[in-house]
């Protein structure tokens, strides 16, 4: 007991000393605090503050299926307690109902150890009857449950330490956002959605995405998220909270358009997900995007371009250009990604995403990441780019080789991680060709989204230490592989004080963007004003 108390006191003092140096709230524009808790709700009741730790041991089948991704945490990285310990004041809470493909991994006997193996892989104890069912899954009712799950814990005090009680609130309007951002004891929760699959159902068994019935269901649900229609057809239950942005694509085909490859070869063999990869956007996808962005009825909902295929992105960029031409500029958002370090016109970037594509690169050149021209477009549209903290999404084969050659938990490995992080940020700034390139990058960690984190910064509570380590590097730079010399690292800082750069990256860029684009009122109030 004494040992446990001593360890707990040490952890508290350590976390306090880490983030005491920063007097601004940290912000994350893409994080999944409820993914493990919500998707395990039929087995065990968790709240959003709890540290979930699903330690199932080294399940051989799970490890094979993950194909070396045994570094994906089974514990919660972004429970609200960890976020508050890390000095976070605002998060974009990304809701994403689990896609049907995850419930039906091949090579598993669901009646035996299937659910346990999936739990081993993800930390989520998925509903057994859904894993056994071959029927398609309706996602919108799950999204409504997800919103209710977050709502239930609102304003309830949580004793973070003996002398500090904290709580969280879902942001309702622009003034409420500003109020929460200024309160260190209340976490501001901005609702966002990842994946257009939420608008209808899975197409796992029967694909009727070209039918009028499917189209009507999808568009009706878009109006529901804009506050124009009640969330349930026979009720007056209009959405209470604005959705800041929605991602059209995720891992599987949803009838709205092609997505970028997200799985490695082994994961594709297990889960599928190849249908729709690199395909163009559909007519329905175009209608969904134009309806979300419309200001004629309800709140405008911004679009997150992450996971869109290159062909879909090309159409979307053209659509944004057409809106800008008539005086309605829309910011380009990429909520969580890495930098490809290459032109979008380069043949290598446009090639199929296969392991050889990254073999001779420090950057990860897969098309799910951002090409230089796309970063420039984010800058020119006054958009936002959240850098994700998956170490292998941020580097290519050369970077991965260096990581694997270094000793785990060594000083050398830690320095490698900071260089990989800095490399991505500096390439984004370089692509903009301006000091204002520092105004578009922020945190989009994707914590709890099955990422493989840097082991020194595995939870939200560790990120002030990451900020401090990055600041130390920017103040005393060394060469970053053969990508940037120390002099280039200095030059790309444009004389901006490092303290200011850290504030931008970890706080003010995202705060200013959300404050600018968050709706003035709740969805139902916006619709009443429209009428």
Image (tube, rainbow, N blue to C red):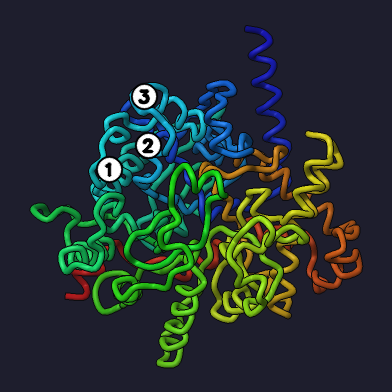
Residue for badge 1: 145
Contact (Cβ within 8 Å) of mark 2 with mark 1:
yes
Q: Identify which residue, 2 or 267, lies in the foreground.
A: 267
Residue at 68% in and 34% down:
15
Q: Locate residue 457, reporting x and y percent.
A: 68, 40
Report whether residue 80 is seen.
yes
- Please rate how many residues cluster around mark 1, counting C-alpha atoms within 10 Å: few if below 14, some from 14 to 19, many from 20: some
Residue at 59% in and 81% down:
380
Residue for badge 3: 44
- Please rate how many residues cluster around mark 3, counting C-alpha atoms within 10 Å: few if below 14, some from 14 to 19, many from 20: few
Residue at 58% in and 79% down:
377
Residue at 24% in and 54% down:
206
Name which quarter of the figure residue 74 lies in: top right
Q: Locate residue 13, reporting x and y percent.
A: 70, 29
Q: Is residue 112 above or below residue 194?
A: above
**Could you tell me how far apart the alpha carbons at marks 2 and 1 are, in whole angstroms?**
9 Å
Report whether residue 524 is seen.
no
Outermost residue toward the bottom in this view: 326
Mark 1: secondary structure: helix
Q: Is residue 377 left or right of residue 104?
A: right
Mark 3: secondary structure: loop
Name which quarter of the figure residue 102 lies in: top left
Classify the position of the N terminus by image quarter: top right
Residue for badge 2: 38
């Amino acid at each position: 007991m004494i040992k446990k108390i001593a360890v707990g006191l040490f952890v508290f003092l350590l976390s306090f000393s880490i983030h005491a140096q920063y007097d601004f709230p940290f912000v994350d524009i893409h994080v999944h605090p409820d993914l493990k808790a919500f998707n395990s709700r039929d087995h065990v009741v968790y709240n959003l503050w709890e540290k979930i730790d699903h330690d199932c041991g080294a399940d051989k089948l799970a490890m094979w299926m993950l194909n070396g991704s045994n570094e994906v945490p089974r514990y919660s990285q972004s429970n609200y307690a960890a976020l508050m310990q890390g000095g976070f004041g605002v998060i974009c809470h990304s809701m994403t109902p689990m896609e049907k493909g995850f419930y039906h991994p091949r090579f598993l006997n669901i009646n035996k150890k299937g659910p346990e193996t999936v739990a081993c892989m993800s930390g989520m104890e998925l509903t057994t009857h859904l894993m056994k069912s071959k029927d398609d899954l309706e996602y919108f009712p799950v999204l409504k449950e997800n919103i209710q799950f977050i709502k239930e814990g609102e304003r309830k005090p949580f004793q973070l330490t003996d002398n500090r009680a904290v709580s969280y609130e879902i942001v309702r309007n622009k003034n409420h956002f500003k109020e929460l951002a200024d309160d260190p004891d209340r976490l501001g929760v901005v609702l966002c959605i990842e994946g257009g699959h939420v608008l209808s159902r899975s197409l796992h068994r029967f694909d009727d995405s070209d039918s009028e019935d499917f189209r009507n269901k999808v568009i009706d649900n878009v109006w529901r998220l804009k506050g124009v229609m009640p969330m349930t057809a026979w009720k007056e239950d209009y959405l209470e909270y604005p959705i800041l942005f929605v991602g059209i694509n995720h891992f599987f085909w949803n009838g709205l358009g092609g997505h970028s490859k997200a799985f490695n070869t082994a994961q594709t063999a297990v889960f599928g997900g190849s249908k729709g990869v690199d395909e163009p956007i559909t007519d329905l996808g175009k209608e969904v995007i134009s309806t979300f962005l419309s200001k004629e009825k309800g709140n405008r909902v911004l679009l997150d371009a992450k996971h869109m295929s290159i062909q879909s992105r090309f159409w979307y960029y053209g659509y944004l250009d057409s809106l800008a031409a008539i005086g309605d500029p829309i910011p380009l958002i990429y909520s969580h990604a890495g930098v490809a370090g290459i032109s979008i016109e380069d043949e290598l970037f446009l090639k199929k995403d296969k392991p050889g594509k990254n073999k001779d690169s420090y950057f990860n050149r897969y098309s799910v990441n951002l090409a230089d021209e796309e970063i420039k477009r984010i800058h020119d549209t006054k958009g936002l780019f959240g850098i994700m903290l998956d170490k292998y999404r941020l580097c290519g084969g050369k970077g991965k080789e260096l990581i694997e050659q270094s000793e785990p938990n060594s000083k050398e490995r830690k320095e490698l991680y900071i260089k990989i992080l800095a490399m991505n940020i500096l390439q984004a700034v370089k692509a903009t060709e301006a000091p204002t390139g520092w105004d578009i990058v922020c945190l989009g960690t994707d914590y709890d989204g099955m990422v493989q984190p840097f082991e020194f910064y595995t939870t939200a509570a560790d990120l002030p230490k990451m900020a401090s380590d990055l600041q130390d590097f920017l103040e005393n730079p060394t060469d970053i592989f053969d990508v940037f010399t120390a002099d280039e690292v200095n030059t790309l800082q444009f004389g901006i004080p490092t303290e200011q750069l850290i504030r931008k990256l970890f706080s003010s860029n995202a705060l200013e963007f959300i404050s600018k684009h968050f709706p003035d009122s709740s969805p139902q109030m916006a619709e009443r004003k429209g009428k």
